[in-house]
Image (cartoon, rainbow, N blue to C red):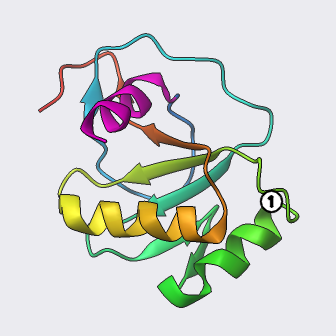
């Protein structure tokens, strides 16, 4: 699981979204960004935001379904503040899996060493 987490972190692109979050850095070459990516942001206080809309954890599946128009094959780009606890991040990833979203990419900052 840790290997998959690292692969997703280095393979996901950085996107411009208005939600302020302090992302960890990655030295990996970024991959191509889709036209309309679906972002799930986890802030330092563990609040969740789908796109730019705050959601409660119990409403995550419904918010993702609305944003992805019900397409479970949509890749979800998960952005988490670098201060978020590993357990909290894994709980969100479990919620994504339970909602049927299996294509998850972790987003990090481009061009820096991970700290």
Residue 26 within the segment the image draws in magenta: no
Please, is residue 67 above or below residue 108 in the view? below
Which residues fall within the magenta stretch? 1-12
Residue 4 within the segment the image draws in magenta: yes
From the viewer's perspective, is 30 left or right of 87?
Answer: right
From the viewer's perspective, is 84 left or right of 110?
Answer: left
Q: Quadrant of residue 60?
A: bottom right
Q: Quadrant of the C terminus?
A: top left
Residue found 18% across the figure and 27% down from its top: 114
Q: Is residue 66 something that shows in the picture? A: yes
Residue found 85% across the figure and 65% down from its top: 70
Residue found 88% across the figure and 63% down from its top: 69
The answer to which of 98 and 70 lies nearer the viewer is 98
Percent coordinates x, y for residue 103 in the rendering: 62, 44
Q: Which residue ends up furthest to the right in the rendered image?
A: 69
Residue found 29% across the figure and 49% down from its top: 22
Q: Quadrant of residue 65?
A: bottom right
Task: Name the main secondary structure of what is drawn in magenta.
Answer: helix
From the viewer's perspective, is 81 left or right of 50?
Answer: left
- Residue with the mark numbered 1: 68
The answer to which of 53 and 9 lies nearer the viewer is 9
Q: Is residue 84 something that shows in the picture? A: no
């Amino acid at each position: 699981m840790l290997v998959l987490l690292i692969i997703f972190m280095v393979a996901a692109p950085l996107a411009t979204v208005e939600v302020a979050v302090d992302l960890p850095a990655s030295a990996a070459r970024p991959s191509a960004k889709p036209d309309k990516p679906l972002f799930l942001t986890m802030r330092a206080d563990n609040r969740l935001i789908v796109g730019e809309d705050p959601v409660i954890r119990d409403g995550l599946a419904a918010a993702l379904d609305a944003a992805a128009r019900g397409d479970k094959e949509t890749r979800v780009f998960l952005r988490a503040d670098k201060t978020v606890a590993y357990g909290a991040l894994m709980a969100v990833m479990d919620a994504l899996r339970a909602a049927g979203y299996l294509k998850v990419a972790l987003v990090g900052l481009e061009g820096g060493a991970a700290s």
